[in-house]
Image (tube, helix red, strand yellow):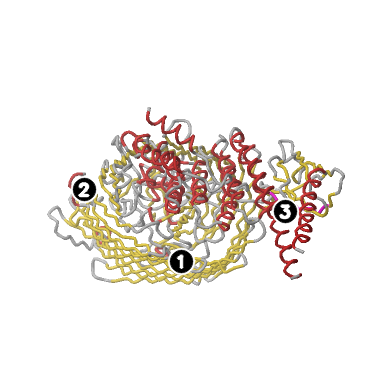
C-alpha cells in the first residue's frame, strides 16, 4: 500500500514538473507604449503582470515589451512616481497582446508651482525657499537680528533711526509680526527717538520665516504693508545647555528633551550691560544710566497623539538714561530716562484630527509697561523748569504707559484632493492701552484706548495642474473702536513655465486701524486701506535664485492728524491717500565660486502720500528711491572660519520741517531737503574651533562683528527745533559698533550643523 | 489511514510546489543580483533592475530580499547620476520599498544600512542646506546597523567612506577614515552571507578605498 501511494505521488510530482516545463515553453509577448494624459511618451515606467515576476520598464520612447508564461485572467499594472496608478484586467491566451497605457500626471509638492508673489521664505525643509534659517544669523549686517537680515532683501528700507520694518513705502507701523500665527505687539525693544532698537527674539527660536512684502494671506490682517510670519521650533534633537559671553552681556540656558523624546522644556536667562561697550565705543549720547536689560524665557513642547502643544513665555526688563544737548538751546540739555517691563506668552496647539482635518489653536497674552521721563537740565545737570515759552515748558514731562494685549485664534485646515487645501478660522484680539502724561506743572492727562477686534477668514489653495495654482482668500474684520466692518479679498495666481521659471500675480486689499497714539480720534473714522498688485518672475535652481517683482500699491483713507484740545496729535479724518510703485531684483548664487555664497538685491521705489500732518502729497521721510544690498558668505575651511560681509546702500532720503501756520490754520512745509546717500559695510567672522573634534561634547563659536567698517558718514534724517528752527542731523549713535562674543553649547555635537552651513 | 494519506499527499504536494516556486525565485534573484554590477554603469539600467526586483517582491510578498535589492538599486541610481533633480522622489520610493522589507525582517542590519544610504541620497541633492537634517540621520542609521549586527562589514565601510569625503578640517579625510575602512576589510574576511542571495557587496570597493587611502 505504501508503495502504491509512493507511486501515485511520483506521478503527482511528474505532472507538476510537466506543468512547469510545459508552461515555460508557451510564452506570450505583451507589448505597448506608455504615454501621459497629453500623449507624450513616458520612460522609466514599471510595467508588471500582477503577482508574477514578469514585466518590463518602458524605454525612452515609452515602449515596453516582455514575455510571460502566465495564462488566464491577470492584471496588468503600470506605476511611476508622480503619476496615477494603472491596472487593467486581461485574459492571456496564446496570442500576442498589445496594451497601450495612458497615465495621468499627479499634482505633487515636488512638481507643483509655488505661490510666491510678494513673499520671501526662509526654511530648511521646504522647497522653493530663498533663504535657510541659518542665513538669517550669518548675514553680516544683521548683527543676529531677524529684521536686520530682512533688510538685505528687496522691498525693505535701510532706516537707521528707529526699529521696525519699512516695506515698499510703508511706515514701520504698517508691518506686523506673528509668531506661530499670533500677533506680537512689541516685537522690538522699547527705544527712544533717534535710536534704532533690535528685535527682542533670538533668531534661533525659529525654524521658519516668511517675510511678505505685500499681497500676504487672508490668515493675517491689520497691516497695510507687510507681514513677517515666524514659526517656532519643535522638539530639540537632544538635551543641551549653552552659555554665551560677549562684550555686551552674558546668557545661559538649557533645553531638556524627555527620555521618550515626546516632550521637552527649556529656560534661559540673559543679562545685557552696555557699560563696557560704551566705554570703548564712544556714543553720541552721554549716559547717566547705562543700558541694562534682564531677560528670561521658558518654553515647553509636548507631542500629542497627532500633533504638538508649544508654549513660549518671555519676560524682559530694561533701564537706560542719557543726556543730549537740547536742540533749541546752546546751554540746556535733555536728560531722558526710559524703563520698560515686557512680557509675552504664546500657546499653540496643532493637531491632526483625522480625515485630512487639522486644527490649530493659538492663545497669546502680552503686557508692556513703559516709563519715559524727560528733564530739561543746565550744563551742571540741575533741573530747569520753565513755564514760558511753552516750547521749553513742555520739555519737562513724564509719560507712563501700560498696555495689555490678548489674542485667541482658531484655524481649521482641510486637505482636499491633490494639494488642494481649505483653511478657515477666526481671530479675537483684545487690546487695552493706558497712558498718563504728566506736565511740568504736575497736571496729568490720562488716555485710554480699548479695542476688541473680531476677524473671520477663509482661504483655499487650488491647483489646476502642476503648472497652475491659485490662492483665494477673504478676511472679514470688525473693530469695536472703529464701529464698523471691513471685508478684504486676497488672490494670488502662479504659473510654472517649462524652464522651471514661474510667474506669479498677487492682489489684495488690506485694512488697518490708526495707531493707538493717534487715538481717540476727533471724528468718526474708518479703516485705512491699501490695495496691492504684485507681478513676479522667479527661477530657482538648487544653487541659484533669480527673482524680480513689480508692484503697485494704492493707499486710501489714510489718517490725517491735527491737534486736540490738549495739544496732542490725534487722528482727525480718513482723507489721506497715496501710492507706492517700484521694481525689485534679487539674485543669489552659491555655484559660481566654490565655497562662496552671495546675494544681491536692488529696489526702486517711487512713493508719495498725504497722511498725518503732511500739507500735501509728498515723499515720506522713511523712503529712499534706490536701495541695494550685497551679501557675501564664504567659509574658509583651512581657518575653520565663516567670513561674512555685507554692503548696504541707499540714496538719500527726503527730510522736511512741517510747521503749523496759525494764519493759514494748517501745516506748511517750512524747510525740505535730501540726506546724503547711505553706505554701510558690515563685516563678521564666525570662528568654529570645535569643528572636526568629533568626540568633543561641547561646541564653541566665536563671533566678531563690525558695523560700518569703513566709518562712512551716515545721516538718516534731520530733527528741527520747535522754537528756534535749528536743524540737527540724526545719525548712528556711534560711528562703528564692534561686537565680540563666544557661545558654547554642551551636550549637542553641533559639528554637523556647522559643516552644513559651510560645505 | 486514508485521511493520513491524503494529508501526506497534500503536504508533499505543497512542499514540492514550494520547492519549485523557490527554485524559480532563487534563479530569478540570482540572475538579477548578477546583473547589478553591469547596471551600475547607467542609472536607467539600475532603475529598470529595481523594477525587476520589485516585481519579484510583490509576487512573493513574504521575501524581504527582493524589496531590499529593489531599494538598493533605487538609492544607488541617485549616486551615479549627475542630475539630482529626481533624487528626492527616487529616495522616497526606496524608503517605501525598504520599509516593506523591514516589516518582513525587523531589526535587520542590512536594511538599516539602506536607510542610511537613503538619507545620504537626500543629502546629496543640496549638501549645503541639508547636512543639518540628513547628515546626522545617515550616521545614526549606520550606528544602528552596527549595533544590530557587529559582524556586518558594510556599516564600517559606509562610515569610512563618509569620513574620507569629509574635509580634513571637519575631522574627515583618509586618516580618520582608515580605522573604519580597516575594520570593514577585517570583517569582510570572515563575513559569510546567509545564502547566495543575501547582501554581499562592498568588499572590493572598501579594499580599493583602503589602498587609495594608504597611498
Q: Quadrant of the N terminus of chain A?
A: bottom right
**With B166 as the anchor, is A606 left or right in this view?**
right
Dot 2, crowdedness within 10 Å: few (<14), some or many (≥20)? some
Q: Nearer the viewer, mark 2 or mark 1?
A: 1
Circle 3 sits in a helix, a strand or a loop, which is it? loop
Instruction: Please say if B142 is above or below A176.
Output: above
Q: Earlier in the sequence, mark 1 or mark 3?
A: 3
The residue singled out by tag 2 in the image is: A277
The residue singled out by tag 3 in the image is: A51
What chain does mark 2 sit on?
A
Residue A452 location (% of width, % of height): 48, 72
Decide if residue A521 is in sight here.
Answer: no
Look at 26% across and 47% down and name the residue there: A741
The residue singled out by tag 1 in the image is: A303
Instruction: Please say if A393 is above or below A465.
Output: below
Instruction: Please say if A173 is above or below B1.
Output: above
Q: Quadrant of the C terminus of chain A?
A: top left
Q: Nearer the viewer, mark 1 or mark 3?
A: 3
Dot 3, crowdedness within 10 Å: few (<14), some or many (≥20)? some
Amino acid at each position: 500500500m505504501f508503495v502504491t501511494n509512493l507511486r501515485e505521488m511520483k506521478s503527482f510530482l511528474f505532472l507538476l514538473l510537466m506543468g512547469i516545463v510545459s508552461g515555460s515553453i508557451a510564452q506570450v509577448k505583451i507589448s505597448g507604449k506608455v504615454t501621459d494624459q497629453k500623449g507624450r511618451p513616458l520612460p522609466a515606467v514599471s510595467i508588471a503582470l500582477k503577482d508574477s515576476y514578469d514585466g518590463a520598464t518602458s524605454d525612452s520612447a515609452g515602449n515596453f515589451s516582455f514575455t510571460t508564461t502566465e495564462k488566464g485572467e491577470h492584471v496588468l499594472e503600470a506605476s511611476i512616481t508622480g503619476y496615477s496608478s494603472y491596472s487593467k484586467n486581461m485574459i492571456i491566451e496564446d496570442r500576442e497582446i498589445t496594451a497601450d497605457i495612458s497615465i495621468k500626471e499627479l499634482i505633487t509638492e515636488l512638481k507643483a508651482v509655488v505661490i510666491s508673489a510678494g513673499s520671501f521664505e526662509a526654511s530648511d525643509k521646504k522647497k522653493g525657499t530663498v533663504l535657510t534659517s541659518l542665513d538669517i544669523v550669518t548675514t553680516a549686517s544683521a548683527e543676529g537680528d531677524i529684521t536686520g537680515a530682512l533688510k538685505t532683501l528687496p522691498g525693505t528700507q535701510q532706516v537707521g533711526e528707529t526699529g521696525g520694518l519699512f516695506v515698499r513705502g510703508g511706515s514701520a507701523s504698517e508691518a506686523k509680526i506673528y509668531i506661530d500665527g499670533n500677533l506680537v505687539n512689541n516685537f522690538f525693544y522699547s527705544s527712544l527717538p533717534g535710536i534704532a532698537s533690535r528685535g527682542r527674539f533670538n533668531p534661533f527660536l525659529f525654524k521658519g520665516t516668511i517675510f511678505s512684502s505685500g499681497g500676504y494671506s487672508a490668515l493675517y490682517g491689520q497691516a497695510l504693508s507687510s507681514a513677517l510670519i515666524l514659526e517656532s521650533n519643535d522638539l530639540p534633537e537632544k538635551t543641551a545647555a549653552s552659555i554665551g559671553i560677549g562684550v555686551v552681556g552674558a546668557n545661559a540656558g538649557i533645553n531638556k528633551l524627555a527620555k521618550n523624546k515626546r516632550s521637552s522644556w527649556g529656560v534661559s536667562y540673559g543679562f545685557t550691560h552696555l557699560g563696557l561697550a560704551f566705554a570703548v565705543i564712544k556714543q553720541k549720547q552721554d549716559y547717566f544710566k547705562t543700558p541694562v536689560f534682564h531677560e528670561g524665557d521658558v518654553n515647553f513642547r509636548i507631542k500629542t497623539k497627532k500633533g504638538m502643544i508649544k508654549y513660549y513665555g518671555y519676560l524682559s526688563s530694561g533701564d537706560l538714561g542719557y543726556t543730549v544737548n537740547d536742540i533749541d538751546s546752546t546751554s540746556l540739555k535733555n536728560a531722558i530716562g526710559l524703563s520698560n517691563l515686557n512680557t509675552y506668552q504664546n500657546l499653540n496647539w496643532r493637531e491632526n484630527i483625522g480625515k485630512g482635518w487639522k486644527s490649530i489653536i493659538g492663545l497669546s497674552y502680552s503686557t508692556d509697561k513703559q516709563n519715559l521721563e524727560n528733564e530739561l537740565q543746565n550744563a551742571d545737570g540741575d533741573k530747569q523748569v520753565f513755564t514760558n515759552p511753552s516750547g521749553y515748558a513742555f520739555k519737562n514731562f513724564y509719560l507712563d504707559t501700560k498696555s495689555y494685549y490678548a489674542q485667541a485664534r482658531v484655524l481649521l485646515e482641510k486637505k482636499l484632493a491633490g494639494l488642494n487645501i481649505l483653511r478657515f478660522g477666526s481671530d479675537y484680539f483684545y487690546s487695552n492701552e493706558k497712558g498718563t502724561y504728566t506736565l511740568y506743572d504736575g497736571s496729568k492727562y490720562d488716555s485710554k484706548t480699548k479695542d476688541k477686534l473680531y476677524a473671520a477668514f477663509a482661504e483655499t489653495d487650488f491647483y489646476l495642474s502642476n503648472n497652475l495654482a491659485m490662492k483665494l482668500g477673504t478676511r472679514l474684520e470688525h473693530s469695536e473702536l472703529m464701529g464698523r466692518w471691513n471685508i478684504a479679498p486676497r488672490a494670488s495666481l502662479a504659473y510654472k513655465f517649462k524652464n522651471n521659471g514661474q510667474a506669479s500675480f498677487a492682489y489684495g486689499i488690506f485694512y488697518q486701524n490708526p495707531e493707538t497714539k493717534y487715538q481717540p480720534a476727533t471724528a468718526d473714522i474708518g479703516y485705512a486701506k491699501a490695495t496691492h498688485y504684485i507681478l513676479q518672475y522667479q527661477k530657482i535652481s538648487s544653487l541659484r535664485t533669480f527673482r524680480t517683482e513689480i508692484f503697485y500699491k494704492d493707499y486710501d483713507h489714510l489718517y490725517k492728524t491735527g491737534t486736540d484740545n490738549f495739544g496732542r496729535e490725534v487722528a482727525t479724518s480718513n482723507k489721506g491717500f497715496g501710492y507706492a510703485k517700484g521694481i525689485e531684483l534679487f539674485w543669489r548664487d552659491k555655484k559660481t565660486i566654490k565655497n562662496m555664497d552671495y546675494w544681491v538685491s536692488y529696489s526702486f521705489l517711487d512713493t508719495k502720500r498725504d497722511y498725518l500732518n503732511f500739507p500735501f502729497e509728498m515723499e515720506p521721510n522713511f523712503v529712499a528711491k534706490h536701495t541695494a544690498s550685497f551679501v557675501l558668505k564664504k567659509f574658509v575651511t583651512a581657518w575653520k572660519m565663516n567670513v561674512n560681509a555685507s554692503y548696504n546702500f541707499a540714496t538719500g532720503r527726503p527730510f522736511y520741517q512741517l510747521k503749523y501756520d496759525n494764519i493759514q490754520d494748517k501745516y506748511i512745509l517750512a524747510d525740505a531737503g535730501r540726506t546724503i546717500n547711505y553706505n554701510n559695510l558690515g563685516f563678521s567672522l564666525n570662528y568654529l574651533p570645535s569643528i572636526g573634534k568629533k568626540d568633543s561634547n561641547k561646541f564653541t563659536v566665536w563671533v566678531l562683528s563690525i558695523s560700518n567698517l569703513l566709518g562712512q558718514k551716515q545721516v538718516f534724517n534731520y530733527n528741527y527745533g520747535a522754537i528756534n528752527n535749528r536743524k540737527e542731523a540724526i545719525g548712528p549713535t556711534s560711528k562703528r559698533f564692534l561686537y565680540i562674543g563666544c557661545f558654547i553649547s554642551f551636550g549637542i555635537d553641533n559639528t554637523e550643523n556647522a559643516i552644513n552651513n559651510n560645505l | 489511514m486514508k485521511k493520513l494519506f491524503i494529508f501526506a499527499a497534500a503536504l508533499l504536494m505543497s512542499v514540492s510546489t514550494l520547492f519549485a516556486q523557490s527554485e524559480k525565485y532563487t534563479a530569478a534573484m540570482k540572475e538579477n543580483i548578477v546583473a547589478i554590477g553591469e547596471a551600475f554603469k547607467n542609472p536607467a539600467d539600475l532603475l529598470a533592475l529595481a523594477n525587476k526586483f520589485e516585481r519579484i517582491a510583490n509576487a512573493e510578498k513574504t521575501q524581504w530580499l527582493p524589496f531590499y535589492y529593489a531599494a538598493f538599486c533605487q538609492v544607488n541610481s541617485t549616486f551615479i547620476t549627475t542630475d539630482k533633480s529626481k533624487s528626492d522622489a527616487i529616495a522616497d520610493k526606496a524608503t517605501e520599498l525598504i520599509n516593506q522589507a523591514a516589516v518582513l525582517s525587523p531589526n535587520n542590519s542590512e536594511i538599516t544600512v539602506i536607510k542610511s544610504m537613503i538619507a545620504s541620497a537626500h543629502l546629496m541633492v543640496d549638501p549645503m542646506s541639508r547636512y543639518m537634517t540628513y547628515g546626522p540621520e545617515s550616521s545614526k542609521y549606520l550606528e544602528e546597523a552596527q549595533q544590530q549586527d557587529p559582524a556586518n562589514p558594510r556599516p564600517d565601510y559606509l562610515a569610512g567612506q563618509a569620513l574620507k569625503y569629509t574635509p580634513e578640517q571637519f575631522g574627515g579625510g583618509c586618516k580618520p577614515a582608515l580605522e573604519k575602512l580597516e575594520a570593514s576589510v577585517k570583517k569582510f574576511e570572515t563575513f559569510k552571507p546567509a545564502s547566495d542571495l543575501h547582501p554581499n557587496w562592498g568588499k572590493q570597493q572598501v579594499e580599493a578605498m583602503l589602498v587609495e587611502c594608504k597611498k
